[in-house]
Amino acid sequence: MLVWIIDKEWNSYELEEGLLNRELPGLEIRYSKNETCREDLEKFGKKAGGIICQISVAITGDFIAALEQCRVISVYGAGYNNVDTAAARARGITVCNVPGYCVDDVSDYVMAAIYHGNKQLEEYHRHIRNGKWGAQAVTEIINRLSVSTLFIAGYGRIGRAVAAKAKALGMEVLAYDALSKPQGVTAVSLEEGLARADFVTLHVAYTRETEHLADRDFFSRMKNSAWFINASRGGVVDEGALIEAVESKRIRGAVVDVVETEPPPPDARILHTPGILVTPHISYLSVDALRELQETAARNVADILKGRPSENIAG
C-alpha cells in the first residue's frame, strides 16, 4: 500500500512515518513538493491509497479523477477549501482535516496583535532613534486594554478562545457569528460590532459567502482609531480595501497573518504599506501544535485505511 505526502513545509516526517508504519506494516511512503505533485501524480501518486497534503495544495476534480486507488485525503490543517470535496465523495474518497489543533496558538497570536496595536512598541523605538525620550516619544496616549472593546467576527473554537483571553484582561467582548448566537459575550450584528470596537478580529471560514467579507464598506464602519486583525484566511479580506483604509487613516492599522496570494511576491503592496504588519502565516505554529497536526493528519489516513471511524471527516 502507498501513502503519498505532498508538502514543502516540514523538515521531518518522523511522526507520520512512525505512526503509519506501526498501523500499516509494509507500507510504502512517497513524497512530493507542492509544485511537483502534478508530475508525481502520473509517476506514482495515482496509485496512492491515502494522501496527506498541505492546505495550499490544489486537489481539484481532475486531480481526483486521476486517482485509481485512493480512499482518503487528509489535509495538514483545519481548512480544506483547496480540496474538491464533492469530486472526492463521488469517487468514494473520504476527506479529513485537523480541526482545533492550533486554537491556543492562533488565539495567542491575536492577543499579541492586540498588544502590538495597543502598546505601539515599534513606534516608540523609532522615536528614540530621532532623539525623543519619555513622554516626548508618545504621539498618541493609549487607553488601557481593560477599557477597550474587542469585536470577534466568527465565534468558533478560536473565536471563543480569543474571547476568554480578552475577558481575562477586562476587555469588553462583542461577537458575531452567522450560524449561531455567541454565548458568554455580548452578541451583536456585524455592523454594530464594527462600529463599537477598538480591535476587530476575523475568525470565519473561507467560503463563497465570506470571500471579501472585509471590504470597503466593512472598513468604513470601523472607528478611525481601531485595529484590524486577520488570522483566518487571506481571501476573506479585500486586500486593496484594507490597504486603502490604512493609507487613508480610515482605520489605525492592521496585523495580518494571511494574505490573498501566498506566498506573496516580494513587491506585494501589502508588504510595504506603513501601518500594516504582515506575518508569514505562522500564527498556528508551535512545537505542540505541529506535533498534534502531523500525528492527527497521519492518524486520519490510518483510521480510514483500516476501516475505523474518524472524528475528523470534513465537508
Image (cartoon, rainbow, N blue to C red):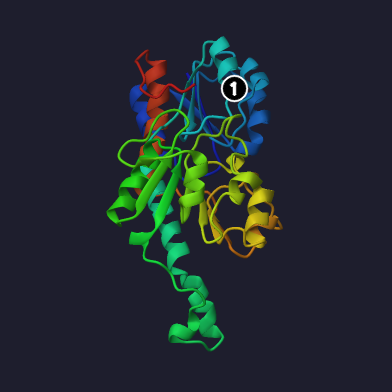
The percent position of residue 139, horizontal first and vertical second, equals 52, 77
Pick the front one: 210 or 65: 210
Can you identify the residue that label 1 sits on? 84
The percent position of residue 4, horizontal first and vertical second, equals 52, 27
The secondary element bearing badge 1 is classed as loop
The percent position of residue 187, horizontal first and vertical second, equals 39, 39
Q: Is residue 190 visible?
A: yes
Pick the front one: 257 or 111: 111
Q: Residue furthest bottom?
A: 131
Q: Residue furthest left?
A: 168
Please give the name of the residue rendered at 58% of the width and 58% of the height, measured from the top-left corner: 251
Please give the name of the residue rendered at 35% of the width and 60% of the height, measured from the top-left corner: 147
Does residue 47 lie above or below 203 as drawn? above
Q: For the residue marked with disc 1, what is the amino acid? A: Asp
The percent position of residue 50, horizontal first and vertical second, equals 49, 22
Pick the front one: 114 or 190: 190
Q: Residues within 10 Å of mark 1 (few under 14, many from 20)?
A: some
